[in-house]
Image (cartoon, helix red, strand yellow):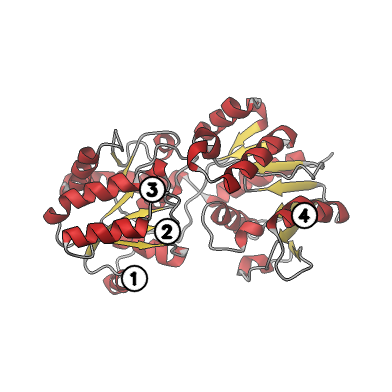
Amino acid sequence: MVIGIDCHNLEKERTGVGRYLANLLQQWSKFEIQNNLRFILYFHKKIPDDEFLQNPIFEKKLLRFWPKPSFLIYFLFLLPRAFKKDRVDLAFFPGYMVPFTYTGRSVMVIHDLAYEAFPEVFPLRYKIPYRIFSRYGSKKSKAIITVSEFSKKEIERFYGISPEKIFVTPLGVAETFKQISDELILEKIKQKYGIEKNFILHLGQIFYRRHVLESIAAFKKIAGDFPDFQFLLIGKNWLKEDLGAILKEVNSEIGREVLTWKLFAPDDELVLLYNAASLVLYLSDYEGFGLPPLEAMACGTPVLTTNFASLKETAGDCAIIVNDPKNIDEIAKKISKGLLDFDLREKIIEKGLKNVQKYSWERCASQTLRILLNCLPR
């Protein structure tokens, strides 16, 4: 039996789907895989050199025949053709979309439906293909995998899919995300990211639903009370506003480099940033899962988040909750509380460390593989 996997998300800086798929494959590389099962991994531009990809259970193929291949050509034509040529028994699409040019047996993953719930904030070049190929895949696939009960209900609501076809496999927190007490290492990572002493951290792609502008305004209000603190943002900007210009203006008004922004941090540096931060912010209206708060908890860092969507499932009472993420005054008060209330910090750190024990990539990978095997032809 052959399972073919669309792996183009592994080729670039890994956020979201890329991190998800990398963790699945890494776990599968450790499993005892039955002899009659093969995985063929298909790539668009290059084959990454991760150690786990060298496992002989993975056959890797690069689908390109000119120097600058188009993603649509890869997705709509090269990938379906390769599935057919290689006689793939089941195609696994881990990133929201199934091409309508593929008519074989498939399983897809829909992590969330933000592009359906908030279509007005997504550029057309992303919104249109996501909505078309996601809807098609949800109807055609043998099973849909998602990452939370909240997202399962959203798939039922938007696409009218029977709940029996949707399987929830909660994400995991990698074992590398843990408490680190080496102050020298933590000081070095702070220096690399332009942090002088203390800081709060926001991680994740910057959407309106994550209320980054409100968080900036809130921190601006209290920056004078915390002269040794900075606010580090990590993630690609999806706002219409020029985020760099906003940060520059706020820093100028405050009179110091209080806000700093980086587009990306690899996992080996991210774990250090979580440990070095005094507080992690993740004020989202809508998440399919919400992994950053859990990773922060695993590193023993208090989290400030909301109780909306899947975050109610994953963070629960293990974080400081902002009830109205549009309320700048409330955010400012909760940030202050998160930095100054040491009894509260100790309490939620302890709860967070217990909470993350429920989330394992090994368990997620095992559940996912079981679903795929059950969808193979008999």
Tell me the kind of residue under disc 4. Answer: Leu
Residue marked by disc 1? 189
**Residue at (82% x, 41% y) in the render:** 103
For marks 1 and 4 on the same chain, the one whose residue lies earlier in the sequence:
4
Per the rendering, the mark at residue 293 is 3
Rendering quarter of residue 330: top left
For marks 3 and 2 on the same chain, the one whose residue lies earlier in the sequence:
2
**Picture coordinates of residue 292, whole percent (x, y):** 41, 50
**Nearer to us: label 1 or label 4:** 4
Residue marked by disc 2? 177
In-image side of 190 versus 16 (left or right): left
Helix, strand or loop at disc 4? helix
Helix, strand or loop at disc 3? helix
Q: Is residue 291 visible?
A: yes
Tell me the kind of residue under disc 2. Answer: Phe
User: CA–CA distance between discs 3 and 2?
Assistant: 12 Å
**Nearer to us: label 2 or label 1:** 1
Residue marked by disc 4? 79
User: CA–CA distance between discs 3 and 1?
Assistant: 20 Å
- Disc 4 crowd rating (10 Å Cα; few below 14, some 14-19, many 20+) is many
Count the marks: 4
**Residue at (44% x, 62% y) in the render:** 264
Helix, strand or loop at disc 2? loop
In-image side of 165 versus 239 (left or right): right
For marks 2 and 4 on the same chain, the one whose residue lies earlier in the sequence:
4
Relative height, residue 187 to residue 156 (above, below): below
Per the rendering, the mark at residue 30 is none
Could you say which is closer to the camera, residue 63 or residue 129? 129
